[in-house]
Amino acid sequence: MRIVNLNPDSDIGASAWFVELDNFRLLMDAGMHPKRDGRAALPLYSEVEREDVDAIAISHCHHDHVGSVPVAMRHFPKAHVLMTDLSHCLLGRVLHNSVNVMLRQREEHGINDYPLFTHDQVEENEVQFQGFKCNRPIEWGALQKARAGLRSPDLEFFDAGHALGSAGILVRGKSQTLFYTGDVCFHDQTLQRAARFCDVQADVLIMETTRGDRLPPPGFTREGEIDRLTEAIQRVLARGGCVLMPAFALGRTQEILALLALLMEAGRIPRQPVHIGGLGRVFTEIYDQKAHLANRWHTDLKLTRDLQLVVLERDQLHSMKLTGGRLFVLTAGMLTECTPAHDLALRMIGDERQAIFFVGYADPATPGGRLKASKPGETFVFSAAGGEVTRRCETDDFDLTAHASREALLDFVGKVSPRTVLLGHGGPAARQWFEEQIRDRYPKMKIIQPAPGLSVEV
Ligand SMILES: [Zn+2]
Ligand SMILES: [Zn+2]
């Protein structure tokens, strides 16, 4: 088996893995780097340019895993794109939104590479998207190979518990198997139930390492964190301030909305409208529609019915009064520029009644990361568009992660019992922690941290 890590960065970056097994070639994920612009955000497709890729398999619909699907399809026009049924409901919407974002960035930041693909292209691509049920082997080889009597390795999706439609991918060859975790969560969230990777075993494991550098504080529990967030929201509303919770449109937004709905239901926070963004609304509707098909809790909770959701247009953000205790759940999670959350945060930062509560990861090099790191009264550069600000608002950080803890992942490695582990989707310190721990606990396993573009034979 040959594997090439196509992530252009040694950080979380853009997920894309090329795999060759039994003479079949597969691309797993085709992401886009969230912190890079233009072509530099793409996976290193040039490294596998001459390869005849038979199929593209997608783990889930977050931008860092699917943002460059149309570009990958230009490189590998024959390849069908395989995903779970639930991801199939999302992927087109995600990619059309990417086109809109790129067009806006071209206009506002002069990034001339953009858009890297068009709405028309996404529409053409969609014909080749295929949704499958989890826990069922899929045949995916090209037709001409089947005619020649060649049988592709089976491919199978396993629910990854990370966001709607997320899956780990098992590839079962004649004599070797590969398992790719994608982004995985081994604990229950408010809506999403924990991953169901069953008793999957594989010779080779490609694993995400997002939380490898996160040591949970002593006594930490998710329930405790939710209580802390609830009390913080109560406090801000009582003083007439507003709460902004920056959140990614797919997954995080619905988790937070569900939490707010349950808190209102229980009378812990007052019933009131929740302001969200247009894209958040689109994915929230899909969450509601697919509630009974998803591996989730509260299937009878319909967010669009049980909450008063108010969709905010970007121009409203500049004039809306920030009094009387409003709730905002807006993209982007890291307050990146040209987003509603960025613009609203900019209005709130200097006002001590307001609160910005982070409920997900914010990279230190983003406006969200800089705000998170700031001290009360500190002046710092928030963003190029926002310039210098003095922080007077309340900020706090709540750990409601959709990624497995490092201990849970380490146990999982033992269960899969692979010969070789490839570490990806994490910063250098995170991967290093896993390398050391795996070496300690499972000394026979070979551990590889494949550098960008490096081809490894396993
Ligand atoms: Zn993800
Ligand atoms: Zn990811």
Image: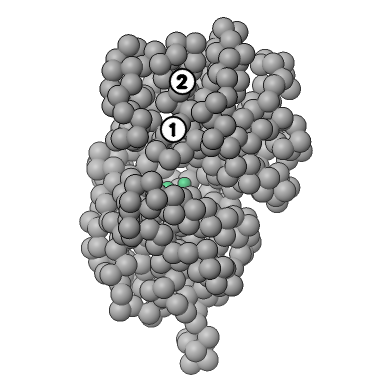
Q: In this view, does 239 lie above or below 136?
A: above
The CA distance from mark 1 to mark 2 is 10 Å
Side of 219 relative to 383 (left or right): right
Residue 85 seen = yes
Q: What residue type is labelled 1?
A: His
For the C terminus, which image quadrant? Answer: bottom left
Describe the element under mark 2 as helix, strand or loop. helix
Describe the element under mark 1 as helix, strand or loop. helix
Q: Is residue 225 above or below residue 66?
A: above
Side of 304 relative to 231 (left or right): right
Q: Position of residue 149 (x, y in %)?
A: 50, 90
Q: How many labels does the image show?
A: 2
User: Quick one: label 1 or label 2, which is nearer the N terminus?
Assistant: 1
Q: Are marks 1 and 2 in contact (CB under 8 Å)?
A: no
The residue shown at (29%, 46%) is 11
- How crowded is the residue under tag 1: few (<14 C-alpha within 10 Å), some, or many (20+)? many
Q: In which quarter of the image is residue 163?
A: top right
Which residue matches tag 1?
342
Q: Where is residue 41 in the image (x, y as percent from the top left)?
A: 32, 55
Give 234 or 325, whichever is nearer the viewer: 325
Give 9 or 448, whichever is nearer the viewer: 9
Q: Which mark is residue 348?
A: 2
The residue shown at (58%, 44%) is 279
Residue 155 seen = no
Q: Is residue 192 above or below residue 244?
A: below
Q: In which quarter of the image is residue 422?
A: bottom left
Q: Where is residue 226 in the image (x, y as percent from the top left)?
A: 55, 22
Q: In which quarter of the image is residue 1?
A: bottom left
